[in-house]
Structure formats: structure tokens, C-alpha cells
Image (cartoon, rainbow, N blue to C red):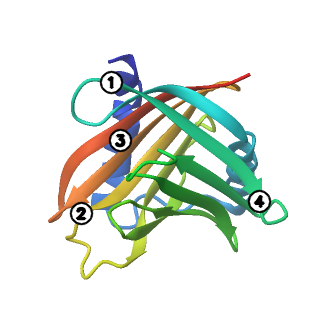
Amino acid sequence: MKLVLALASSLVLVGACQSMSGACKTMPPEQAQAAFARLKTLEGRWTGQARHGGDPFPVEVTYHVTAAGSALEEKLFVGTAHEMVTMYHMDGEQLMLTHYCSAGNQPSMVARTDPNMDVVKFTFSRATNMKSKDEMHMHSGVIRFVDADHIEAIWSGMSEGKPVGDAVFDVRRVR
């Protein structure tokens, strides 16, 4: 519950960015580079709780800096039918991600401005393996750095132009 309340205002802002064309800009280059550098500090193994609909369940997430430091790989639900990979990277001056979803599509999102550098917000940009953006897909996300060893995230799905639920993660670095 604490996580949902802590990130609710961030999700409202992400929604406002989506509905007010041009209201939220991509991050300035210096902020995008700083946010990407901060994301790369996640390298390692993380465990905690996730919730998607029902009761919380245990989750493990791994992060790996790869491609000579130009990408951060996130793996979720490794070894299961729902295994997914998200790749974070710079595209010129923009911080982006591509989410390789167990649903078989690959939405890409761009980081948006936020005065709070402890929060990185991503919103839908484009996708592959989707006939239209009305198909179910991950549409936005918020990662909040609680401290160096604790993050909270909410990833929001869309289908037929409507929110379909959030995947909420509260994980800590394994030492």
C-alpha cells in the first residue's frame, strides 16, 4: 500500500503527460545522461515483492550493464513462461527503453522530465509486433530510487486505449 501511495502522484503525472500533447518534454540531454548513469548503478541481483492484481508474490530482478556500458539489461521472471527483458539505453540525447514482453510485443518508451532525480518516468513511444496501439501492452513506468539498495516501480498496461492494471515492484539489492 505504501508503494502505491508513494508512486500514485507520479503515475498521475505520467497520465497527464500522455493526455496533454507536448506538455511533458523528453529529458534534457544532461538529465537523460544522469538518469541513465543512475540506472546503471542497479547492476546486480534484487529481490522483493511484486503485485499484479491479487496478493503480493516474491520476485527477483537482475540488472546487467552490457555493450561496453551503452545498455542496461533488466531480466524479470527468469526461467518461467513469463520471462521478460527490458533494455535501457541512450538514443542520441534521449533515454529510452525497449521492453521485450512475454505477450510477444516490444514497446519502446522514452524518459520524460521530472524535477525529482530520484524518479525516472517512461512513457510509450512506439512498439513492434503490435497491429495497433489498442492491443495490450506495457505503456508507462515509474522507477523510484528509495536509496542505493531499494527501488520501487510501477509498470502500467494499456488495452483498447484504457488502463488495464499495474505491475508493482518493491525490491532490494541482494548483498
What residue sits right under mark 4 in the picture?
A: 66
Q: Residue at x 85, y 64 (%)?
A: 68
Query: What amino acid type should be assigned to the residue bearing mark 3?
Result: Leu
Earlier sequence position, callout 4 versus callout 2: 4
Residue 88 % position (x, y) = 62, 59
Residue 134 % position (x, y) = 20, 70
Which image quadrant is residue 103 in?
A: bottom left
Query: What amino acid type should be assigned to the residue bearing mark 4?
Result: Thr
Choose mark 3 or mark 1, whichever is in front. 1
Are circles 4 and 2 on residues that touch, CB within 8 Å? no
How far, Cα to Cα, is label 4 from label 3? 29 Å
Q: Which mark is residue 11?
A: 3
Earlier sequence position, callout 4 versus callout 1: 1
Identify the residue at the far bottom of this view.
131
How far, Cα to Cα, is label 3 from label 1? 20 Å
Earlier sequence position, callout 2 versus callout 1: 1
Q: Quadrant of the C terminus?
A: top right
Badge 4: residue crowd in 10 Å (few <14, some 14–19, many ≥20): few
Earlier sequence position, callout 3 versus callout 2: 3
Above or below residue 108? Residue 27 is: above
Badge 3: residue crowd in 10 Å (few <14, some 14–19, many ≥20): some
Residue 73 % position (x, y) = 64, 55
Viewer-side residue, 38 vs 117: 38
Q: Which mark is residue 56?
A: 1
Query: What amino acid type should be assigned to the residue bearing mark 2?
Result: Met
Are circles 4 and 1 on residues that touch, CB within 8 Å? no
Choose mark 4 or mark 3, whichever is in front. 4
Viewer-side residue, 81 vs 99: 81
How far, Cα to Cα, is label 4 from label 2? 29 Å
- Label 4 SS: strand
Q: Which mark is residue 136?
A: 2
Query: What amino acid type should be assigned to the residue bearing mark 1?
Result: Pro
